[in-house]
Amino acid sequence: MDTNLKAAELLLVEDNASDAELIIRALKKNFIGNSIAHLKDGEEALEYIFATGKYSGRKIEDCPKVILLDLKMPKVNGLEVLKAIKSDVRTKAIPVIVMTSSKEDSDVAECYKLGVNSYVVKPVNFENFSKAASEVGFYWLLVNQTANV
Amino acid sequence: MELKKEIQDNGIQNFAVDHKSIFESLPGLYLILLPDLTIVAARDPYLKATLTKREDIVGKNLFTVFPDNPEELDSTGELNLGASLKYVLKLKKQHRMALQRYDVRQANGTFVKKYWQPLNSPLLNSSNEVVYIIHAVEDVTDLMLAEEERKKHEEENARILKDLSDLKYAIDQSSIVGITDQRGIILDANENFCRISGYERDELIGSSHFIINSGYHPKSYFQEMWRTIASGKVWKGEIKNRAKGGKEYWVETTIVPFLNEMGKPYQYFAIRTETTDKKNAEEQLYRSNEQLLAVNKELESFSYSVSHDLRAPLRAINGYTTILKEDYASVLDEEGNRILSVITNSAIVMGQLIDELLAFSRLGKQKLVRVELDVEPIVQTIVSELKDVYRGIEFKLSTNISAKLFADNTMIKLVVTNLISNAIKYSSKKAEPSIRVSCKLENGETIFAVEDNGAGFDMKYYNKLFGVFQRLHSNTDFEGTGVGLAIVERIINKHGGKVWAESILDQGSTFFFSLPNN
């Protein structure tokens, strides 16, 4: 799996296995994300993005084109991951889309303050959920022009 | 020698001739009367004291010249003097009168208060008949007035003392009173002080005030108190003390420094009122409030958790069932597919319920920002949005709006959306659904109403109408979660307004809310 991760275009940080599976399915069904890396918590995400710990063999420059980030995760939560990404010059250009269960006003405000690129609430309805996931992937992977890092 | 003798003889002879003028200029207040009380002669000092002139009184009757003061109804001057003179004439003996008030008439006719000490003496001839009465008086007015003044002062002092002792009594009855010296040694303690502290008066007096210290307050608290009173200022504060048995009590204390003539405190007068009950209630309130804050915090984290953790499994249920339908529809029969639909729909409904419940619970925390709002555009925007939601339902809308709303923009839009959405929903089964929205001023309030010609409800269930998750129609007739009107009521209450409704079953309902106009 590690070898796949190195070349990932889309990084999905999601601790909930079902949500992760549903998101990945929705993306694949819409032919988005040939290479998706799925990490299960914030700590692993930070190691991956900053090429430390078990990902020390990676290069920071090999960054994903987009990161889908859950907020509520064990150990290191999404807000902390977002903060780390957006406050480091090497990573702050990576588009980060927060996908979360709830629309707590304080969370939304905090995310935008930290520089999130988009904030998406995961709907219960699967049709809407997969639509949301694939639209996000489509826009940020295929439409959006990122600056060369 | 010869010359000297001659002078002496002349003098003696002349004295006989001059005795009248000699008498008149001698000191002492004397008046000579004939037995019929005609004034014969008067000394200058007498004239001066009685404010008279010799030519005005000599030859006149004594009482003509010195009448009683008509302003003083109970004057006894004339009466007493008359009696004394009668005594002298009759008994031919000297009579010393008691101290008399006998007012004197001034030139302008008014009287001056005067006190006299008179002595009447008869002057007898050789046949032992009274020829003259010598009326000698001493003017004791100044003395008497001073005495009167002294008495008045004494009475006043007595009254002040009584007032003071009355006041002391009142304070003793109502308050805990203690007096200490500059070092805090108790000099006096009233009954209340003894009762509340549990000490005998003897035990308190002479002890340091520290005897009732509870140790509750930091040292700095009393340091500040001492600084204040030692500088001559009044100190007020609440103190927790400890009684003899260890029981603690609170007192609201006012300490008044008594200052000496140098302006330095020599005693401290402390008046206290027990406030133990009040303090306990305050502490209880504080604790309850702390608990409430804790519960609120718990609730907040609960609702946060609900919104995250409860929705995730729902997404899984819905998602995997959908996958099942997509990938294995051909393997399942019609009934199997129907059951999958029920599962996915139920998950969606539960998701909605969670969302609405969270929205409802969040309302409590939200702050109101009141602004003046034009109602017509709000209604039109909401109706056009709702036309999208209720596609296929044709309804007639009429508005009659003559007032503005002073309310929170977002929240009031939610209220209006809920009311109009209900009106559309519940009239959707009528042949010609019709909705009327009005907003007008009435008795200083803005009254907003949404009327429909829909299904209505039975007024006997009115008390359930605005309850959370309460519904008056089944889900098969009209879909809904039962949160909408609860949200409406909560928002309007938050604005200080009222919500109510009228309805006739099968004929329609009208929902109202009123907002105060300020």
Image: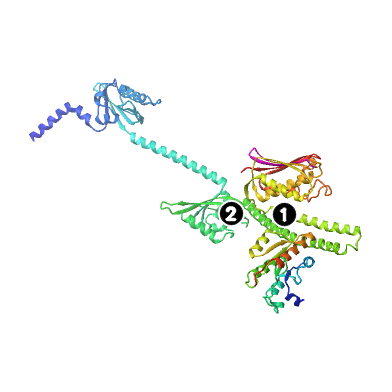
- Residue drawn at 22 percent across, 29 percent down: B24
Can you see residue B489? no
Residue B41 relative to residue B193: left or right: left
- Residue drawn at 68 percent across, 61 percent down: A107
Residue topped by disc 2 = B199
Label 1 CA crowd tier, 10 Å (few <14, some 14–19, many 20+):
few
Q: Position of residue A14 (x, y in %)?
A: 74, 68
Residue B20 relative to residue B505: left or right: left
Q: Position of residue A98 (x, y in %)?
A: 70, 64
Q: Position of residue A66 (x, y in %)?
A: 70, 69
B137 vs B447: above or below: above
Extreme residue in the top direction: B36
Q: Mark 2, chain letter?
A: B
Residue topped by disc 1 = B359
Residue B166 relative to residue B123: left or right: right
Extreme residue in the bottom direction: A57
The kind of residue on which mark 2 rests is Tyr
SS category of the residue bearing label 1 = helix
Bounds of the magenta span?
A: B439-454
